[in-house]
Image: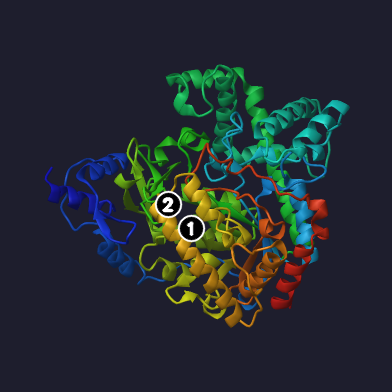
Amino acid sequence: MKSKQLDELARRHGISITRPSPDGQEVPISNETKRKILAALKIEPRPKKGPPKSSGKAGAHSARSRSMKKKTPKAYLSEGLSKTRVWGISLQLYELRSSRNWGMGDFEDLTVMADLVRSLGGDFIGLNPLHAPFLADPDRCSPYEPSNRQRLNPLYVAVDQVPGFASSLALDRRLEDLRQTDLVDYVGVAHTKLAVLRSLWANWQRGVPSRHPVYDPADFEAFLHEGRKGLRRHALFEAISFSMVKSAAGAGWHTWPAEYQNPDNPAVVEFERENADEVRFHMWLQWLAHRQLAEAAEHARKVGLRIGFYLDLAVGEAIDGSATWSKRDIYIAGATIGSPPDPFATQGQDWHLAAFRPSTIASGRRSPYRRMVSAAMRYAGAIRIDHAAALRRLFLVPLDSLPEAGAYVDYPQRRLLKILAKVSARYRCVVIGEDLGMLPEGLQDDLSEAQILSYRVLSYERDKSGFRPAEVYPALALACISTHDHQTLAGWWRGRDVKARAEHGIVPPDVTEQHVKERKSERRDLKEALGNAGLDPPAQLTARTADEEKLHDLVVCAYRFIARTPSLLAAVRLADLTSEKRPTNIPGTSDDYPNWKPKLSVAIENFGAIPLVARIAAAMRNERPKE
């Protein structure tokens, strides 16, 4: 096929024929990339008659202009919320320490946090994705690379709350060891929890308990009926995954024998018949997680959190997890989600995540996208869509290719917005779109028109003249200082993020040198912005003279700044309150940093004794009083 014909075919199927470079220029993608992406989309390499679907930037903008002539579907936004401004605390659930948990935060800790946030005057708790991981390989712990987004993580189950639980001296000693670690020992936590849960499952089958207000056997049966084939296949995947790990194969299905890679294979059918109890056990784990999260959400509402929980949604799923094994036909198999080269990742990124196929993502009454967002909204007063650009397009990297050899592919934005509008209205759930980084033209306007809140992070709200004033932040937004991918504000001030990128080889030395220079001006600009806002940032505060007391003063000033924005929601990061030194996640690293494992340095029972907690909460209440 000639290049011109290949370009036409690529455009017709929503493949942009250029990508951005780190310096902001448009770089043509190769013919090889076009062919690989077409193959991943299951498109035959034959040109067809008729106008192309898209032609890069201009074509995408034209398509957007045509689609937006229609009435835009609007996501849920209560009248009460639209007339006030509220704040809450964001955290990673696993990072919580407590005197009773089993080495990582759980749903009972979340209930305790709801009481704390209420006492501080907040109205929501922002959480990391709670999607199902690989239980048979607990160290695959990134909440943003889940096995299945429609299922929950059973490691968050508070086992001591399950009826029939009884402790022992040996278990108490083991739990104390797990609580004392600086990093979450996912392997140890999983081994301990699952061993006890298996014994409780045996009791459950014997009728212990027969009646319970929360853990009612009839509710379990109703849960199984509601979950249908999808729930059963996830449980079957887990059962096979554990079996494969025991036989030295991997937890993900790509490493399984061929006869187990297809859920409809007779070998899989026979496995399920022979291991029916194990499959039912994994469905029971999902039910326990469902019951405890639902109870925690109900408790948050009862104590007065006006939004309750806001849950993160990962942008994709592991390529070898439960979701892609169960419903292979709705996923792209020949390419994974990533991002093109940019100033902070000059080689680009391959996130190794499976994406829904554009042709199937919104198809049918129970479309894959509808099922996925419904699974989170049922527990939440708000959801945050990670990488909201995926509503318009995804950067796909062909398998066995470098990220720079990827290409953008269009998705059915209007149909996805319509799904979000319908499901959010059903669950009365606010939608937040993480609209950071390189965004397609006009996307933020489209999201605003659809009543999807923007996600405004302080360090990104800066232009050539400095940090933007608080008053120019949009009202339809969540404002915050940092996310799980950033250092705390104190760490940012000291340049720990710049140092980490250099130490881990994420950016070359010349770029690091430039980032060091830029940080000096960024610190100066931040102090200027705080001063212009009528706040009083600490004087003589430099990276070298930044003692803890002055840094705390700076953090309080910065949160007052965020609180003064018109944005409907403002989030306080828990790691800022406890002055954490280690970041949650360093993007671009894997084995050389313990991403998603650092615990907070303070137990939740001691939060009330931290002066910075009281100071920031008082500042937020003062700037955003409850009406």
Q: How many marks?
A: 2
In front of the other: 59 or 28: 28
Marks 1 and 2, the one that precedes in the sequence: 2
In front of the other: 556 or 571: 556
Which image quadrant: the C terminus?
Answer: bottom right
Q: Secondary structure at mark 2?
A: loop
State left or right for residue 546 relative to residue 35. Answer: right
Q: Which amino acid does the dot numbered 1 rest on? A: Ile
The numbered disc on residue 362 is: 2
State left or right for residue 62 relative to residue 240. Answer: left
- Marks 1 and 2 in Cβ contact (< 8 Å): yes
Q: Which amino acid does the dot numbered 2 rest on? A: Ala
| Residue at position x 37%, y 37% in the image | 333
Quarter where residue 427 is shown: bottom right
Can you identify the residue that label 1 sits on? 419
Q: How many other residues sit within 10 Å of disc 1, few (<14), some (14-19) or many (≥20)?
A: many
